[in-house]
Amino acid sequence: MKYNMSRENNGLHSASVPGILALDLCPTDTNKTLTGGADKSVVVFDASSQQILATLKGHTKKVTNVVFHPSQELVFSASPDSTIRVWSVPESSCVQVLKAHEGAVTGLSLHATGDYLLSCSDDQYWAFSDIHAGRVLTKVTDETSGCALTCAQFHPDGLIFGTGTMDSQIKIWDLKERSNVANFPGHSGPVSCVAFSENGYYLATAADDSSVKLWDLRKLKNFKTLQLEEGYQVRSLVFDQSGTYLAIGGTDVQVYICKQWAEVLHFTDHSALTTGLAFGQNAKFLASTGMDRSLRFYSL
């Protein structure tokens, strides 16, 4: 596997409030990128034509999570302003504001059907919302821990999902039963991200302890810990669609080959923290965003 940096874009977000905080790629056209900025805006950018397709403004605080809809020209964003927004890309307009939380929205994940959003917040609740009706269907807090939630991600099957907390807990939830069905202890410090592999067998988790833990969801156990250098901050974890590679972004960018869990790529091009990572189709490229305001592409 040989990637080289092929493109760099620096003009998507405001220079006066530097930092891209979130990244997603369009599942049907991975030339289209979605970024959320410290400048409170959401940007849809076409990397092939180098055109900004939409700049979406409405959040009153920074944008920390962004998600593309897989089949409709909709995108979603979340912010510490306690709102989730649904945007129409062709109209460059906000079509729904979901008020699912009292506190900062810290995690956002779209259900496999494309009809529902999972969100979590430092108000200690996770919520499940209907994007078309624009309403919250269910809201649940974990009575046992009473702790701020830091991230949330659907499993590819849409039946379960994972959440991370400020006090280093990782919990797996059954959506239908709204119940906590498994817990993965072992991290210390706030959980920064969780990522399921596309085949649904693995969960990767990271916290402020400079480690990435890998869990087997069939056996419910930690089978590998990637210990990164002391002080390493992890801000993004992503598997490619085939489940061959795991990318880690934060202090720098590292790519590991799954099964062997050996590092195969290492990039230090961002001059500040890497905040988002996403693989293109068939892992032909890797996109990254950072606090240096740049969107970078590494391709074969």
Image: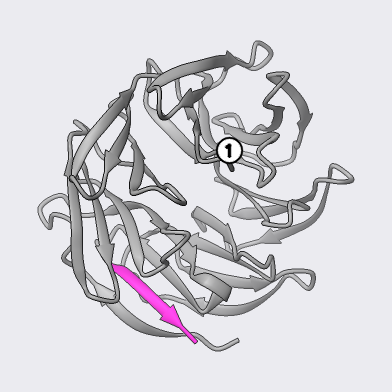
Residue at the limit of the structure toward the top, as seen here: 143
| Residue 35 coordinates in the image, percent (x, y) | 31, 54
Q: Main secondary structure of the magenta part?
A: strand
The one of 230 and 290 positioned closer to us in this rendering: 290
Crowd class of label 1 (few under 14; some 14 to 19; many from 20; radius 10 Å): some
Residue 298 colored magenta?
yes
Left or right of residue 255: residue 213: right
Quarter of the image for the N terminus: give it.
bottom right
Residue 227 colored magenta?
no
Q: Mark 1: which secondary structure?
A: loop
The one of 70 and 12 positioned closer to us in this rendering: 70
Can you say whether 92 is above or below 60 in the image?
below
Q: What segment is highlighted magenta in the picture?
A: 294-300
The one of 183 and 128 positioned closer to us in this rendering: 128
Query: Residue at 73% across / 23% down in the picture?
Result: 180
Query: Residue at 73% across / 19% down in the picture?
Result: 177
| Residue 281 coordinates in the image, percent (x, y) | 52, 71
- Tell me where residue 20 sits by quadrant: bottom left
The one of 209 and 95 positioned closer to us in this rendering: 95
| Residue 142 coordinates in the image, percent (x, y) | 63, 16
- Tell me where residue 63 sits by quadrant: top left
Can you say whether 295 is above or below 101 in the image?
below
- Tell me where residue 172 sits by quadrant: top right
Can you say whether 194 is above or below 182 in the image?
below
Left or right of residue 235: residue 297: left
Residue occupied by mark 1: 189
Amino acid type, mark 1: Gly
Query: Residue at 67% across / 68% down in the picture?
Result: 242
